[in-house]
Each structure stands twice: as C-alpha cells, then as structure tokens.
Amino acid sequence: MRDAVRQATLAELGEHGYSGLTVESVAIRSGVHKTTVYRRWGSVEGLIADALELAREEPWPMPDTGSLQDDLREIVRLVRSGFADPVAGPISTAFVAAAVQSGDAARSLHDFFTARHEQAAVVVRRAVERGELPPGTDGAEVIRMAVAPIYYRLFVTHEPVTERDAERAADAAAAAARAGVIRVA
Amino acid sequence: MRDAVRQATLAELGEHGYSGLTVESVAIRSGVHKTTVYRRWGSVEGLIADALELAREEPWPMPDTGSLQDDLREIVRLVRSGFADPVAGPISTAFVAAAVQSGDAARSLHDFFTARHEQAAVVVRRAVERGELPPGTDGAEVIRMAVAPIYYRLFVTHEPVTERDAERAADAAAAAARAGVIRVA
DNA sequence: CTCCAATCGCAACTTATGTCGCGTTAAGCT
DNA sequence: AGCTTAACGCGACATAAGTTGCGATTGGAG
C-alpha cells in the first residue's frame, strides 16, 4: 500500500510535474482513498518526502578513470543527462521544487544530497592518494563545486545547460582542487 | 495602483514567505480588489514576476579592490549576506521559489540574473586587463562559478552557508580562472 | 473462536481559491 | 459638454483542497 502510493506519486510527478501533483490524483491512481493519504502523508510535501527515500536507495555508478578531471566530467555528465531525461528529469526537478517549499521535503533532499556527496567524494579521495591533489582536500566540497553550476543554471537562473557548460564546471573544480584552494576547515 | 500592489507583494513575501503569499492578502493590503489583481496579474506567480522587475532596477555596488580574488570574495559576501538578511532574505528566497514553479517568474528571474552577471563580469574584465587572467576568460561564467555553490547549498541541498563556504567558492572560481579553464566557447 | 485495536473507506462538511456578470467610474476624443 | 471605451469595484457563484465522524474491515492476542 505504501509502495502503491509512492509509485503513483512518481508517476504523477513525471507526467504533471510538482505543481500539477495533487493528493487526490495520487489517491485515485494508487487506489487508496483520499482521506487515507491525507492521514498518513499529510500533504503533497509528505508524498514527496516519502518518494525521496525511495530515490535515495538507488545506487549510483561511480567512475574510476584514473584521472580526477575525467571522473568529475563523468559525474557532471550523469547529473546533466539525468535532468535532461524525459522521464527522470521532471521527477528530479519536482523534488527540488518541493524542497524549496516544504521543510519536510527539504530535510529529505538534504539527506539525499549528503549521501550523494559522500559517495562521490571517493573520486577525490582517490586523486589525493594518487598524489594528484594535496592532502586535506575537501572531497564533498569539490563535488559541490563541480555540480553547483549545473543546478544554478537549472533552478536559479533558468538558463539552458549545455554539455560544454557541465564539462567546464568539472574542469574548474578540478583546477581549483589542484591549486589547493578546496581544503577542509 | 500597480505600485501599491508591488509594495504589498514585497511586504507579504517578507512576512510570510512565498508559500504564505496569497492573492487575497495582497489585494487587501494594497486596497485593490481581489478580482482586479486576478485580472491584471493572473496569479501569485504574476505578482512575483512583476515585483522582480522592481528588484532588477536596484543597482548593485561593484567592488574594485585591484585583485580578482578580493573582488569575488566581496561579491559572494554580498550574495550570502543578502539571503541571510531578515528582511531581504525571505523576499529573495521567494523569488527563487516562485521561479521554480512558474514559467513567468522563471523568465523574469532569468532576465534578472542575466543583468547581474553582466554587471559583475566587470571585475573579471578588469582582471584580464591587469594581466591577472588569460584573455578569452568568460566573465559571466566566472561569476556563476563563484556564486553557484551558495545557491546550491541554499536551494538544492539545503545546507547552511557559512561565510567561509562563500569565500572558498570565490577563491575556487578565481583559481580556476587563473588556470585558464574558464574561457568563452 | 472471539474480542480488541488499529487502520481504512466513505460521504458530508468547511474553507480557501479562482471566476463571472454587471453596474460604475474615470480617461480620452470630438 | 457629450460620447465612447476600458478598467475597476462588487457580490455571487464554482471548484478544488483539506477535515471530520462514523461504520466496516483486517490482523493479531488471548
């Protein structure tokens, strides 16, 4: 039952986006009564927060090319293409949109990205071990620097994001890391 | 009349944020009838889009310290403190939140940031003229790199943004620019 | 097998949000 | 001044969102 609602939530998000997501449509699609959804999830934001836990569990393929720059390029490529994807894109976008509005969703998304940053920081740690980067480099922060311009364009300035834009952000993060600017406090 | 509504919109945004902004409260506060607001602005997003034009007109003090790194640090400091400000913060936040939902607001915000980027790119151009950066460096892109991590934390990962985080982003952007990684296409 | 508790389905109700038709006012034109 | 047109105020209406009380179902404990 919980799963039916989560699936329905994701489907609705993909079709109508976050602003088009209503408790009632999720209830109908999942075959669960409207009142029940309200009681257990509280609101649209609750539905999102729950669906996010599902998304967090999905594993992420981490590149290991032997070069930090190429690893970062691959990561940003994945991020960009994820949002460009016609089915996954609207869902991911909806998560971000929901978190801007609701505290619950924001907390869920925070946890989601914390996990992602830790996962992705491996490529930085490996680069340090290879001697490519100075020790004391903040792995999660390098990842943030690499992906931030993508999200910035997508959700703040609402500019198009080209493959080249993403690549440039990855290269810049790599260059800054090499320069020893991104260290832990 | 248009101005009364815009002022009321900003005031409501400051007090209740974007999710607490309703057409009716703006109508009451501005002394304009509800129906009229609906007719001329259409919805909450329309109110935001209109208020954004007002924000765009406000000028922005551009630093000129003689060093790219210090200029960028000052810019990110302004951005960060703007969002931390108890009165301006909620309003700015509301703009971003609205743009994630509505196409109209997104277009307005896009124009807003285009103008900001062009304005701020001066510090990069000056750095190129000083010989601090290689010619062909993309000014707007350096600015994006410097501020993106702040917005990323604020609106995507929902992490706290320390003064040090902002500074580090500025330093990273400066380092990447010096490395010649951020050039025009 | 029976009873108890928790959860769900259901319809009615309340409240917010957005729309419509009409009368009125104000500005521009001749 | 008299006429025309566009915009506004106003209340009534329509629809969507969320809540409540109650009866029915299910699943587990004695």
Image (cartoon, coloured by chain):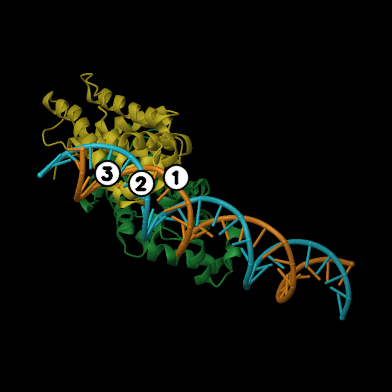
Chain colours: A yellow, B green, C orange, D cyan
Inspect the image, locate mark 2, and give the three-letter code of the amino acid beneath it: Thr
Sequence order check: which comes first, mark 3 or mark 1? 1
Give me the disc on residue A108: 3
Q: Does any portion of residue A83 appear in the rendered image?
A: yes
The disc at residue A24 is 1
Which of pointers 3 and 1 indicates the residue nearer the eye? 1
Question: Which quadrant is the N terminus of chain A positioned in?
Answer: top left
Quadrant hosting residue B144: top left
Q: Are the residues at dot 1 and dot 2 in contact (C-beta closer than 8 Å)?
A: no
Q: How many other residues sit within 10 Å of disc 3, few (<14), some (14-19) or many (≥20)?
A: many
Gap in Å between the C-alphas at discs 1 and 2?
Answer: 11 Å
Which subunit holds the residue at mark 1? A
- Where C28 sits versus B41, above or below? below
Q: Residue furthest top?
A: A65
Residue D24: horizontal and vertical position, in percent? 36, 44
Q: Residue at x 15, y 25 (%)?
A: A126
- Subunit that carries the residue with mark 2: A
How many angstroms separate mark 3 from mark 2 (CA)?
Answer: 22 Å
Near-viewer residue (B35 or B158): B35
Q: Which residue is mark 2?
A: A36
Q: Amino acid at mark 1?
A: Glu
